[in-house]
Image (cartoon, rainbow, N blue to C red):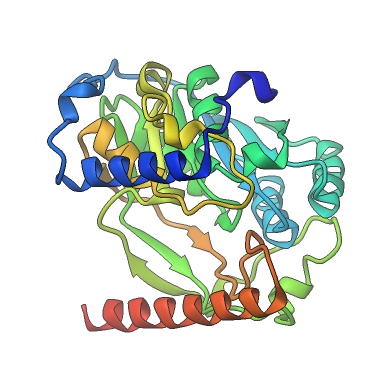
Amino acid sequence: MNASSVRVAPQRWYRGLQGQLARLAVSGVLPIRWLYPKPKQAYPAKAGRLHLEIVSHCWQYAHLQAYQLSSLVLHPPADLDVTMTVYYCPEDEKTTALLAFFAEQKVANVTWNWRPLPKEQLFRRGIGRNHAALNTRADWIWFTDCDVVFAEGTLDALAQQLDGRTDALVYPTEERVTSLLAEDDPLLQKAAAAQVVALDGTEFIVKKITKATGPLQITHGDAARELGYCDAMSVYQTPADSWQKCYEDRAFRWLLRTLGTPISLPGVYRIRHIFKGRYTGSETNTKLRSQIRKLQIGWRDRHDKKA
């Protein structure tokens, strides 16, 4: 994929206006849903041996991506064919080296698919996801993040859950997450070098999921090919000069007219990191944003425990 396959960036003020209008539409303030294509009520059931494409993005998160790719090496699916797609920027040397290492790992029923992008396209996650959605050949496509890890048996359990389904979008009812890990946490340090690394999930806590959030959007392949990933909303297909918040995740559900159908799927883990690799700018700005993130996650965790 190259720059000619995505929209040219408009002026900053116009791009900001586009984003505000899109978020107002998704929130229901602007009643313009009729402007966008209407998805089908149900899609053809896919039965038998299924093909799943897992789509991830990685920018300065090689130590997390290592756990995700390792989980496929250590726990390869038996009843499912998987294409593991990673969008990355060659300027990110650690991720590039990591992907080169895993390209040499031969894993039964798993095909590696590395997709380099200019960083301006990578910074708008909807661009890579839209490219994957429109071009996937899979029966189902799982839009996830590089901090999500699959335990033994998880993907085979998913194959059973997806067999014969007609839903546009499904999601697991729970995930297991870490606390916010600092840069020097042993779990992160363990994956500093390009290698196959096993995840110790004993310190993870269970979080209940009530909708198909950004890393847990498992989409029918026909729905993805029909609508893309917010393909009709140009603001989410425009390159950016820094990492953009993923407002398109909510827009994607809005365009599909569903929060997703819950499914029982054990063994979905997520590693949470206090420092976001996508943060750019001064050291002071990075520390401030990390502190804000720590407060936000702490509040959500306390709310989940009360619930």
**Percent position of residue 15, x then y:** 45, 40
Say which quarter of the image contains residue 239.
top right
**Percent position of residue 232, x then y:** 37, 24
Q: Residue at image x 23%, y 46%? A: 24
**Percent position of residue 122, x then y:** 64, 41
Position of 166 relative to 277 (above/below): above
Closest to the observer, 92 or 22: 22
Instruction: Tell whether 155 sits left or right of 168.
Output: right
Closest to the observer, 153 or 213: 213
Tell me the quadrant of the picture where the C terminus can be found.
bottom left
Say which quarter of the image contains residue 76.
top right
Q: Is residue 151 visible?
A: no
Instruction: Tell whether 141 sits left or right of 75.
Output: left
Q: Residue at image x 43%, y 29%? A: 234
Q: Is residue 196 visible?
A: yes
Tell me the quadrant of the picture where the N terminus can be found.
top right
Q: Residue at image x 84%, y 56%? A: 195
Q: Residue at image x 42%, y 25%? A: 231
Position of 55 relative to 204 (above/below): above
Closest to the observer, 81 or 244: 244
Instruction: Tell whether 90 sits left or right of 253.
Output: right
